[in-house]
Image (tube, rainbow, N blue to C red):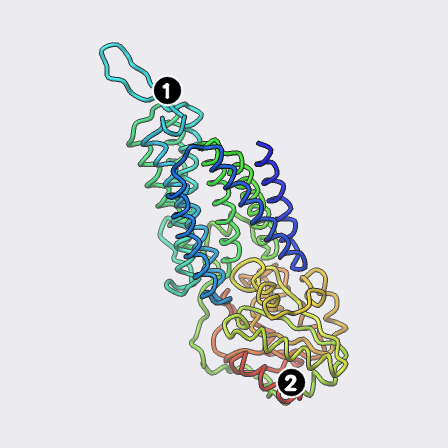
């Protein structure tokens, strides 16, 4: 128990460390130390299997993890996170199914021998609650994460898939699952358990397909919370304190992060689950735009930024797709040599998962003290000479503050339009952001559009600066 408490303390300190880019490496190390303590303690105190089998399983998992981590691109990190969540959910389902099929091995059943009837195993009522909720949450996490992965990876469209009567169908399925879990506490018939499992797989699918691409950061955070609660429920089944502590930490922190993400988008958790936000941009790339706008070149951008006292860089998913973070840092270094003050403004839901932009900038070795969150830097745009927007669309749209008919109205956005000059890198004027709405910022008098691939354009700006 003492070792598990030490592991739990490491996990808590890990979460604290991960709350800041400056301490994230230390947080990761503490998390790994805590997990190592928990695994070794479990192997030492439980007669689970022989060491050769355990070592072989760890080796296989280590190879898959190392190869995957080395090959994965930073732009695919959201997909990787969704895939990890699906594995946690599937593990919870497999543990729950094994416990149901062989409850005596898990110490959750009593053997009863009624008169004139064969002996049978009665699963403890409390354990049935844990099993029912654990496999339900695990199955929802698995199927929901698979759909999230397919959407993030481009195998499914980012627009919502709205089924007729989906709200009634989803609510009815959830009520049926909860009712069956309650019934399972009174009757342990196999059909009840497998029906709970089947309906849970279905509701995970039904809950995620109506959610559009613009809500993906919330979905990733929400699935993270689900995976934690599934692990906690299985911890009770396995009588493992470390799993209970870890699962509760992940579940609660994921729920808090989901709430923060919803606030950042001015949307309620229920409205995200209801889906329907985040249609694919209307109009193909390259579509002719009738509204007048200013178009500039790399030389124009370099000249304007060279003359500036302060430049605020606003990265978005376009930067991630173009993998422009490294050359962007080179541009910032060139500007600082010219005496220009450079800062980075991060919106909480920029990209496809929480912290997406922070991870990319950290990969490019951007100094932590130059990176600021929305609430810390928004007031500075009015005193800034140049706002340099690279692939951040919806989170810079002024319509969120002025157009009540806009689907993003009320969402806190970065006040880039208040800068003296806005330089906006976009591949073309055709197509809108992930929320499916046009950005009024493109047509402002103080905005200059730099139409090109983000990485190529920044490379040309670096050459012009030099």
Quarter containing the C terminus: bottom right
Q: Residues within 10 Å of mark 2 (few under 14, many from 20)?
A: many
Residue 171 visible in rendering:
no
Q: Residues within 10 Å of mark 1 (few under 14, many from 20)?
A: few
Quarter containing the N terminus: top right
Front-lying residue, 460 or 395:
460
Residue 187 sits in which quadrant?
top left
SS class of the residue under badge 1? strand
Residue located beneath label 1 in the image: 110
The image shows residue 58, relative to residue 50, as above or below, that is: below
Mark 1 or 2: in front is 1
Front-lying residue, 271 or 310:
310
Front-lying residue, 52 or 434:
52
| Residue 107 position in % (x across, y down) | 41, 26
| Residue 49 position in % (x across, y down) | 38, 37
Distance (Cα) linking label 1 and label 2: 75 Å
| Outermost residue, top side | 115
In the picture provided, is 120 more to the left or to the right than 58?
left
Of callouts 1 and 2, which one flags the residue occurring earlier in the amino acid sequence? 1
Residue located beneath label 2 in the image: 301
In the picture provided, is 47 more to the left or to the right than 271?
left
- Residue beneath the point at 54% across and 43% down: 251
| Residue 271 position in % (x across, y down) | 51, 50
Residue 294 visible in rendering:
yes
Front-lying residue, 307 or 69:
69
């Amino acid at each position: 128990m003492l070792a598990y408490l030490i592991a739990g303390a490491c996990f808590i300190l890990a979460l604290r460390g991960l709350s800041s880019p400056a301490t994230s490496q230390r947080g990761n190390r503490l998390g790994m130390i805590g997990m190592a303590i928990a695994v070794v303690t479990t192997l030492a105190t439980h007669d689970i299997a022989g060491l050769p089998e355990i070592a072989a399983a760890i080796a296989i998992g280590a190879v898959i993890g190392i190869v995957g981590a080395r090959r994965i691109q930073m732009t695919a990190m959201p997909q990787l996170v969704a895939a990890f969540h699906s594995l946690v959910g599937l593990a919870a389902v497999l543990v729950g199914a094994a416990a149901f099929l062989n409850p005596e091995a898990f110490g959750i059943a009593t053997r009863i021998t009624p008169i004139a009837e064969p002996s049978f195993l009665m699963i403890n009522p409390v354990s049935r609650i844990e099993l029912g909720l654990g496999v339900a949450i695990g199955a929802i996490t698995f199927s929901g994460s698979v759909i999230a992965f397919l959407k993030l990876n481009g195998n499914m469209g980012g627009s919502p898939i709205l089924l007729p009567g989906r709200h009634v169908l989803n609510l009815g399925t959830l009520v049926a699952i909860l009712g069956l879990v309650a019934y399972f506490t009174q009757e342990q018939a196999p059909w009840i358990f497998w029906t709970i499992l089947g309906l849970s797989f279905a509701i995970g699918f039904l809950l995620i397909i109506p959610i559009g691409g613009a809500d993906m950061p919330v979905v990733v955070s929400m699935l993270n919370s689900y995976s934690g609660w599934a692990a906690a429920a299985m911890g009770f089944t396995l009588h493992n304190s470390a799993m209970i502590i870890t699962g509760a930490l992940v579940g609660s922190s994921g729920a808090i992060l989901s709430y923060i993400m919803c606030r950042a988008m001015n949307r309620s958790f229920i409205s995200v689950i209801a889906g329907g936000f985040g249609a694919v941009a209307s109009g193909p790339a390259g579509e002719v735009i009738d509204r007048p706008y200013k178009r500039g070149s790399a030389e124009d951008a370099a000249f304007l930024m060279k003359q500036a006292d302060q430049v605020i860089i606003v990265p978005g998913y376009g930067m991630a797709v173009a993998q422009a973070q490294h050359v962007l840092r080179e541009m910032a270094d060139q500007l600082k040599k010219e005496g220009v003050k450079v800062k980075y403004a991060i919106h909480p839901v920029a990209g496809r998962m929480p912290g997406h932009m922070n991870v990319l900038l950290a990969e490019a070795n951007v100094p932590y003290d130059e990176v600021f969150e929305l609430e810390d830097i928004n007031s500075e745009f009015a005193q800034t000479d140049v706002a340099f927007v690279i692939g951040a669309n919806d989170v810079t749209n002024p319509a969120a503050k002025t157009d009540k008919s806009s689907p993003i109205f009320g969402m806190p956005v970065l006040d880039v339009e208040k800068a003296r000059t806005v330089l906006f890198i976009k591949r073309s004027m055709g197509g809108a952001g992930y929320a499916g709405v046009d950005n009024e910022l493109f047509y402002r008098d103080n905005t200059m559009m730099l139409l090109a691939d983000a990485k190529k354009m920044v490379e040309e700006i670096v050459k012009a600066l030099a």
